[in-house]
Amino acid sequence: MRSLWADPDPAAGPEPGKAKSQYRNYTGGTLRDRVYNTYLLMHTHQTVDFVRQKSAQYGSCSQRKMGAMEALELLDQLVDESDPDVDFPNSYHAYQTAEGIRRAHPDKDWFHLVGLLHDLGKVLALFGEPQWAVVGDTFPVGCKVQRSVVFGDTTFHDNPDTRDPRYSTEYGMYRPGCGLENVLMSWGHDEYMYRVMKVNGFALPKEAFYMVRFHSFYPWHTHGDYGHLCAEEDLRMLPWVQELNKFDLYTKQEELPDVQQLRGYYQALIDKYCPGQLRW
Protein backbone atom coordinates (compact mmCIF):
# COMPACT_ATOMS: atom_id res chain seq x y z
CA MET A 1 0.00 0.00 0.00
CA ARG A 2 1.31 3.44 -0.88
CA SER A 3 1.78 5.93 1.91
CA LEU A 4 -0.72 8.73 2.39
CA TRP A 5 2.16 11.18 2.27
CA ALA A 6 5.22 11.93 0.21
CA ASP A 7 8.73 11.43 1.55
CA PRO A 8 9.51 13.68 4.51
CA ASP A 9 11.14 17.04 4.11
CA PRO A 10 14.90 16.63 3.64
CA ALA A 11 15.39 18.51 6.88
CA ALA A 12 13.70 15.61 8.62
CA GLY A 13 15.38 12.88 6.60
CA PRO A 14 18.64 10.98 6.87
CA GLU A 15 21.65 12.77 8.24
CA PRO A 16 23.89 14.38 5.61
CA GLY A 17 26.12 11.86 3.89
CA LYS A 18 24.11 8.86 5.11
CA ALA A 19 21.88 7.10 2.58
CA LYS A 20 18.63 5.46 3.58
CA SER A 21 20.15 2.08 2.71
CA GLN A 22 22.70 2.57 5.49
CA TYR A 23 20.04 2.52 8.20
CA ARG A 24 19.13 -0.78 9.90
CA ASN A 25 22.36 -2.40 8.72
CA TYR A 26 22.45 -5.72 10.58
CA THR A 27 25.35 -7.25 8.70
CA GLY A 28 28.19 -4.99 9.82
CA GLY A 29 29.19 -2.01 11.90
CA THR A 30 30.67 -1.59 15.35
CA LEU A 31 27.38 -2.42 17.15
CA ARG A 32 26.63 -5.63 15.27
CA ASP A 33 27.59 -8.13 18.01
CA ARG A 34 25.60 -6.27 20.66
CA VAL A 35 22.57 -6.12 18.40
CA TYR A 36 22.81 -9.79 17.39
CA ASN A 37 23.06 -11.00 20.98
CA THR A 38 19.99 -8.96 21.93
CA TYR A 39 17.98 -10.56 19.15
CA LEU A 40 19.31 -14.03 19.96
CA LEU A 41 18.00 -13.76 23.50
CA MET A 42 14.73 -12.27 22.28
CA HIS A 43 14.12 -15.00 19.74
CA THR A 44 15.01 -17.70 22.24
CA HIS A 45 12.73 -16.57 25.06
CA GLN A 46 9.80 -14.76 23.43
CA THR A 47 7.18 -17.52 23.46
CA VAL A 48 3.39 -17.56 23.72
CA ASP A 49 3.62 -18.37 27.42
CA PHE A 50 6.19 -15.65 28.08
CA VAL A 51 4.13 -12.98 26.30
CA ARG A 52 0.98 -13.95 28.18
CA GLN A 53 2.90 -13.79 31.46
CA LYS A 54 4.28 -10.30 30.77
CA SER A 55 0.95 -9.04 29.49
CA ALA A 56 -0.67 -10.11 32.76
CA GLN A 57 2.17 -8.63 34.82
CA TYR A 58 2.20 -5.19 33.19
CA GLY A 59 -1.19 -4.86 31.53
CA SER A 60 -2.86 -3.16 34.49
CA CYS A 61 -0.10 -0.50 34.65
CA SER A 62 0.37 -0.80 38.39
CA GLN A 63 4.17 -0.49 38.62
CA ARG A 64 4.37 3.18 39.60
CA LYS A 65 2.96 6.66 38.96
CA MET A 66 4.78 9.42 37.09
CA GLY A 67 4.16 12.03 34.43
CA ALA A 68 5.01 11.53 30.77
CA MET A 69 7.91 13.99 30.90
CA GLU A 70 9.34 12.20 33.94
CA ALA A 71 9.23 8.92 32.01
CA LEU A 72 10.98 10.56 29.08
CA GLU A 73 13.74 11.84 31.34
CA LEU A 74 14.28 8.30 32.63
CA LEU A 75 15.23 7.33 29.08
CA ASP A 76 18.35 9.49 29.53
CA GLN A 77 19.64 6.33 31.23
CA LEU A 78 18.84 3.95 28.36
CA VAL A 79 20.82 3.09 25.24
CA ASP A 80 18.83 0.70 23.04
CA GLU A 81 20.95 -2.44 22.59
CA SER A 82 18.96 -3.57 19.54
CA ASP A 83 19.58 -0.42 17.50
CA PRO A 84 22.40 -0.69 14.92
CA ASP A 85 22.20 3.02 14.03
CA VAL A 86 22.84 4.96 17.23
CA ASP A 87 24.60 4.64 20.56
CA PHE A 88 23.17 7.55 22.55
CA PRO A 89 20.36 7.78 25.14
CA ASN A 90 16.86 7.06 23.87
CA SER A 91 15.46 10.36 25.15
CA TYR A 92 17.29 12.22 22.37
CA HIS A 93 15.78 9.91 19.77
CA ALA A 94 12.32 10.84 21.08
CA TYR A 95 12.93 14.54 20.44
CA GLN A 96 14.54 13.86 17.04
CA THR A 97 11.48 11.89 15.95
CA ALA A 98 9.02 14.45 17.29
CA GLU A 99 10.81 17.38 15.69
CA GLY A 100 10.95 15.63 12.33
CA ILE A 101 7.20 15.10 12.45
CA ARG A 102 6.65 18.68 13.61
CA ARG A 103 8.52 20.07 10.60
CA ALA A 104 6.64 17.90 8.12
CA HIS A 105 3.18 18.09 9.77
CA PRO A 106 3.00 21.44 11.59
CA ASP A 107 -0.82 21.26 11.83
CA LYS A 108 -0.94 17.89 13.63
CA ASP A 109 0.24 18.60 17.17
CA TRP A 110 -1.09 15.24 18.39
CA PHE A 111 1.25 13.56 15.89
CA HIS A 112 4.18 15.56 17.28
CA LEU A 113 3.36 14.10 20.69
CA VAL A 114 3.21 10.57 19.27
CA GLY A 115 6.75 11.07 18.02
CA LEU A 116 7.85 12.08 21.50
CA LEU A 117 6.16 9.26 23.41
CA HIS A 118 6.29 6.35 20.97
CA ASP A 119 9.25 4.74 22.77
CA LEU A 120 8.35 5.61 26.37
CA GLY A 121 7.48 1.97 26.97
CA LYS A 122 11.22 1.32 27.10
CA VAL A 123 11.07 2.38 30.75
CA LEU A 124 10.39 -1.34 31.24
CA ALA A 125 14.16 -1.80 31.01
CA LEU A 126 14.52 0.56 33.95
CA PHE A 127 11.89 -1.42 35.88
CA GLY A 128 14.23 -4.43 35.71
CA GLU A 129 13.25 -6.14 32.47
CA PRO A 130 16.10 -7.35 30.22
CA GLN A 131 16.40 -5.39 26.99
CA TRP A 132 15.44 -8.41 24.87
CA ALA A 133 11.98 -8.17 26.50
CA VAL A 134 11.70 -4.43 25.81
CA VAL A 135 13.42 -3.23 22.62
CA GLY A 136 13.83 -4.33 19.01
CA ASP A 137 11.52 -5.33 16.18
CA THR A 138 8.34 -7.14 17.17
CA PHE A 139 6.81 -10.23 15.57
CA PRO A 140 3.75 -12.43 16.20
CA VAL A 141 4.24 -15.37 18.53
CA GLY A 142 2.06 -18.42 18.09
CA CYS A 143 2.68 -18.89 14.37
CA LYS A 144 5.54 -19.58 11.94
CA VAL A 145 8.27 -16.94 11.88
CA GLN A 146 8.36 -15.13 8.53
CA ARG A 147 11.53 -14.55 6.52
CA SER A 148 11.90 -10.81 7.14
CA VAL A 149 12.27 -11.09 10.93
CA VAL A 150 15.74 -9.75 11.83
CA PHE A 151 18.25 -12.62 12.21
CA GLY A 152 15.29 -14.97 11.93
CA ASP A 153 17.27 -17.69 10.19
CA THR A 154 19.89 -18.03 12.94
CA THR A 155 18.30 -17.12 16.28
CA PHE A 156 15.14 -19.22 16.83
CA HIS A 157 16.75 -22.66 17.13
CA ASP A 158 16.26 -22.81 20.93
CA ASN A 159 12.76 -21.32 20.99
CA PRO A 160 10.39 -24.14 22.07
CA ASP A 161 7.41 -22.72 20.17
CA THR A 162 9.10 -23.45 16.84
CA ARG A 163 8.81 -27.17 17.66
CA ASP A 164 5.22 -26.97 18.92
CA PRO A 165 2.75 -28.09 16.19
CA ARG A 166 0.17 -25.60 17.51
CA TYR A 167 2.45 -22.68 16.71
CA SER A 168 4.73 -23.77 13.87
CA THR A 169 2.40 -23.38 10.87
CA GLU A 170 1.76 -20.22 8.87
CA TYR A 171 -1.45 -19.41 10.76
CA GLY A 172 -0.56 -21.20 13.99
CA MET A 173 -3.14 -20.37 16.63
CA TYR A 174 -4.83 -17.67 14.50
CA ARG A 175 -7.56 -17.46 11.88
CA PRO A 176 -7.06 -15.90 8.43
CA GLY A 177 -7.73 -12.16 8.57
CA CYS A 178 -8.23 -12.20 12.34
CA GLY A 179 -6.76 -8.68 12.68
CA LEU A 180 -3.59 -7.60 14.43
CA GLU A 181 -5.53 -6.55 17.53
CA ASN A 182 -6.17 -10.28 18.02
CA VAL A 183 -2.56 -11.33 17.41
CA LEU A 184 -0.19 -11.91 20.32
CA MET A 185 2.93 -9.89 19.52
CA SER A 186 6.34 -10.46 21.08
CA TRP A 187 6.41 -8.56 24.37
CA GLY A 188 8.10 -5.16 24.41
CA HIS A 189 7.76 -1.42 24.64
CA ASP A 190 5.16 -1.10 21.85
CA GLU A 191 2.45 -3.14 23.54
CA TYR A 192 3.32 -1.82 26.99
CA MET A 193 3.07 1.83 25.96
CA TYR A 194 -0.20 1.10 24.16
CA ARG A 195 -1.53 -0.30 27.45
CA VAL A 196 -0.33 2.79 29.32
CA MET A 197 -2.15 5.01 26.83
CA LYS A 198 -5.37 2.99 27.13
CA VAL A 199 -5.35 2.68 30.92
CA ASN A 200 -4.69 6.40 31.35
CA GLY A 201 -7.17 7.50 28.68
CA PHE A 202 -4.86 9.57 26.50
CA ALA A 203 -7.00 12.08 24.55
CA LEU A 204 -5.46 11.13 21.21
CA PRO A 205 -7.03 9.80 17.99
CA LYS A 206 -7.22 6.09 17.27
CA GLU A 207 -4.37 6.41 14.79
CA ALA A 208 -2.02 7.45 17.61
CA PHE A 209 -2.75 4.33 19.64
CA TYR A 210 -2.28 2.13 16.60
CA MET A 211 1.02 3.72 15.57
CA VAL A 212 2.48 3.27 19.04
CA ARG A 213 1.28 -0.34 19.25
CA PHE A 214 2.77 -1.50 15.96
CA HIS A 215 5.62 0.88 15.12
CA SER A 216 8.27 -1.80 15.74
CA PHE A 217 6.49 -4.42 13.62
CA TYR A 218 8.93 -4.00 10.72
CA PRO A 219 8.24 -7.43 9.18
CA TRP A 220 4.75 -6.13 8.45
CA HIS A 221 4.88 -2.38 7.86
CA THR A 222 8.17 -2.39 5.92
CA HIS A 223 8.58 -5.88 4.48
CA GLY A 224 4.97 -6.88 3.82
CA ASP A 225 4.92 -10.14 5.81
CA TYR A 226 2.08 -11.39 8.01
CA GLY A 227 -0.56 -9.92 5.72
CA HIS A 228 -2.54 -13.16 6.05
CA LEU A 229 -3.36 -12.17 9.64
CA CYS A 230 -4.49 -8.62 8.85
CA ALA A 231 -8.03 -7.26 8.76
CA GLU A 232 -9.28 -4.29 6.76
CA GLU A 233 -8.67 -1.97 9.70
CA ASP A 234 -4.99 -2.91 9.69
CA LEU A 235 -4.70 -2.00 6.02
CA ARG A 236 -6.39 1.33 6.70
CA MET A 237 -3.96 2.10 9.51
CA LEU A 238 -0.82 0.90 7.73
CA PRO A 239 -0.02 4.26 6.05
CA TRP A 240 -0.04 5.97 9.45
CA VAL A 241 2.47 3.47 10.84
CA GLN A 242 4.62 3.93 7.75
CA GLU A 243 4.49 7.70 8.14
CA LEU A 244 5.67 7.51 11.75
CA ASN A 245 8.41 5.13 10.67
CA LYS A 246 9.94 7.71 8.32
CA PHE A 247 10.73 9.92 11.27
CA ASP A 248 11.37 7.16 13.80
CA LEU A 249 14.13 5.81 11.55
CA TYR A 250 15.53 8.60 9.39
CA THR A 251 15.88 11.34 12.02
CA LYS A 252 18.55 9.40 13.93
CA GLN A 253 21.58 11.66 13.85
CA GLU A 254 24.65 12.11 16.00
CA GLU A 255 23.83 15.84 16.27
CA LEU A 256 21.60 15.89 19.34
CA PRO A 257 18.67 18.29 19.86
CA ASP A 258 18.60 21.06 22.45
CA VAL A 259 16.21 19.41 24.87
CA GLN A 260 15.90 22.42 27.18
CA GLN A 261 14.81 24.61 24.28
CA LEU A 262 12.15 22.12 23.17
CA ARG A 263 10.85 21.01 26.53
CA GLY A 264 8.26 23.78 26.96
CA TYR A 265 6.50 23.02 23.67
CA TYR A 266 6.21 19.31 24.39
CA GLN A 267 5.20 19.80 28.00
CA ALA A 268 2.27 21.86 26.70
CA LEU A 269 1.26 18.95 24.45
CA ILE A 270 1.48 16.56 27.37
CA ASP A 271 -0.71 18.89 29.43
CA LYS A 272 -3.22 18.94 26.57
CA TYR A 273 -3.42 15.22 25.76
CA CYS A 274 -2.10 13.21 28.74
CA PRO A 275 -1.69 15.45 31.81
CA GLY A 276 -0.74 14.73 35.38
CA GLN A 277 0.48 11.59 37.07
CA LEU A 278 0.04 8.49 34.93
CA ARG A 279 -0.17 4.83 35.87
CA TRP A 280 2.72 2.77 34.54
Image (cartoon, helix red, strand yellow):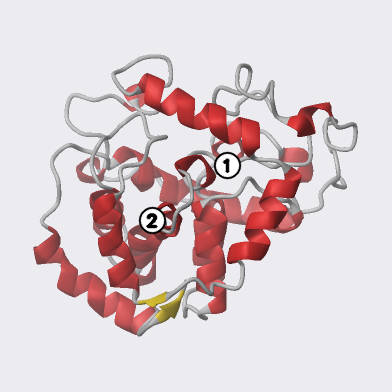
**Residue sticking out furthest to the front:** 128
Q: Is residue 191 visible?
A: yes
Distance from Cα at disc 2 to Cα at disc 1: 19 Å
Q: Which amino acid does label 1 sit on?
A: Thr
Residue 155 percent location from the top left of the image: 60, 22
- Find disc 2 in the rendering and name its residue: 126
Q: Closer to the camera, 158 or 122?
A: 158
Q: In which quarter of the image is the N terminus?
A: top right
Q: Assess disc 1: are there few (<14), some (14-19) or many (≥20) residues with their C-alpha within 10 Å of its C-alpha.
A: many
Numbered mark located on residue 138 in the image:
1
Residue drawn at (36%, 58%) of the image: 115
Left-right relation of 241 to 178: left
Could you say whether the residue bearing mark 2 is in a helix, strand or loop? helix
Q: Assess disc 2: are there few (<14), some (14-19) or many (≥20) residues with their C-alpha within 10 Å of its C-alpha.
A: some
Residue 63 percent location from the top left of the image: 49, 71
Say whether marks 2 and 1 touch (CB < 8 Å): no
Could you say whether the residue bearing mark 1 is in a helix, strand or loop? loop
Q: Can residue 144 be seen in this view?
A: no
